[in-house]
Amino acid sequence: MPANIGVSGTTPRARCHGADADRTAAATGGRGGRAASAGLPWIEEAVDVAPKDARELTKLFVDRLRVLEEGTREYEYARNTLIEMNLTLVHYVAGRYRARGSGQMEDIVQVGTVGLIKAIDRFDLSRGVEFTTFAVPWILGEIKRHFRDTSWAVHVPRRLQELRSRLAAAQEKLSTTLGREPTVRELAAELEVTEEQALEAIVAANGYTAGSLDAPNDPRDEGETHRRGRSIADVMGAPDPALETVEHLHALAPLLAELGERERRIIEMRFGQEMTQAEIGRALGISQMHVSRLLSHTLARLRTGLLADD
């Protein structure tokens, strides 16, 4: 029996009866007491139990877990010990994704542990299946779901994420069969979806990874050549600052046409010729205050027209 397992009941590995069990429970404190009352062995360091022992003990703990009342201290001891004993399964499955983890193995292990917990809650000994056989697909499913939800550079709907995986397989298959890149129609027929859905998946696939703006503009530029050359960011276009002005003028044109002759002339002198209100008043033979009221009324009318168009 492993040194870190203290027996307060009957296990496949060792036995302890009567006063010996009581003394073990008392010596190990609260957790040992919970183990004794649950009819289970007390395990001091469940994460250190060898895989061979863990397989045998898992059967015992699962069998007792099903008859213990959920929410009791005995139930929590059995469930938590099951989780700790089987963490090696999580690390085993997570190890397959070490290269894709981007230094986030801890996150992958945490996600895999969620799958392990779900497997423990759903496992049934009466099915005659080994716990490891049942748990690994659950752990693997949670990890794959994690990558599916977090690996995309931009968020796309789940249905497109799933269709993108089928799309990649269909493209590879058809390329081999046809000796060329398949058309959208051929891909749609292979996937049994409409051409619009296939095209949507192709566009969405571009969001799986994102290129760096610091990457060289010419893919052949590397090393010292790249440091002297230009990056993608260097050659990207920027918004034309005058474009917004053009859009505003285009939207204002029909509104200005609706103004009276005097209102249009005041707007032209104030904003086209940049005349002051006093200068406009002298040119039109009216007071500066009158110009101010006319200008305020006209601008309010134009503003209302623009907001209505929006």
Image: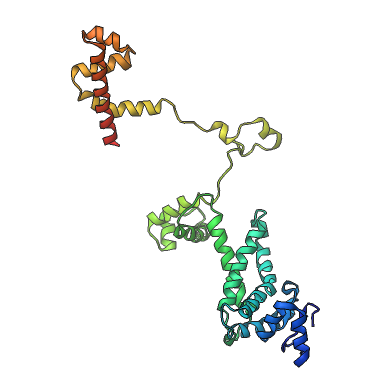
Please give the name of the residue rendered at 74% of the width and 78% of the height, measured from the top-left corner: 29
The scheme the figure's colours follow is rainbow
Q: Which residue appears farthest toward the left when viewing the image?
A: 260
Picture quarter containing residue 256? top left
Image quadrant holding the N terminus, namely bottom right
Which residue is outermost to the right?
3
Tell me: 236 left or right of 228.
Answer: left
Q: Where is residue 103 drawn, in percent x and y?
A: 67, 54
Instruction: Give the residue displayed 49% in from the left and 31% down from the top.
Output: 238
Please give the name of the residue rendered at 21% of the width and 24% of the height, measured from the top-left corner: 257
Q: Is residue 274 left or right of residue 232?
A: left
- Residue 282 visible? The answer is yes
Q: Where is residue 4 in the image (x, y as percent from the top left)?
A: 78, 77
Q: Position of residue 141 (x, y in %)?
A: 56, 68
Quarter containing the C terminus: top left
As rendered, which of 93 and 169 lies closer to the eye? 93
Residue 13, can we see it?
Answer: no
Q: Is residue 72 above or below residue 298?
A: below
Residue 66 relative to residue 52: left or right: left
Residue 262, image x, y percentages? 20, 16
Name the one closer to the observer, 262 or 165: 262
Residue at x 25% of width, y 14% of height:
289
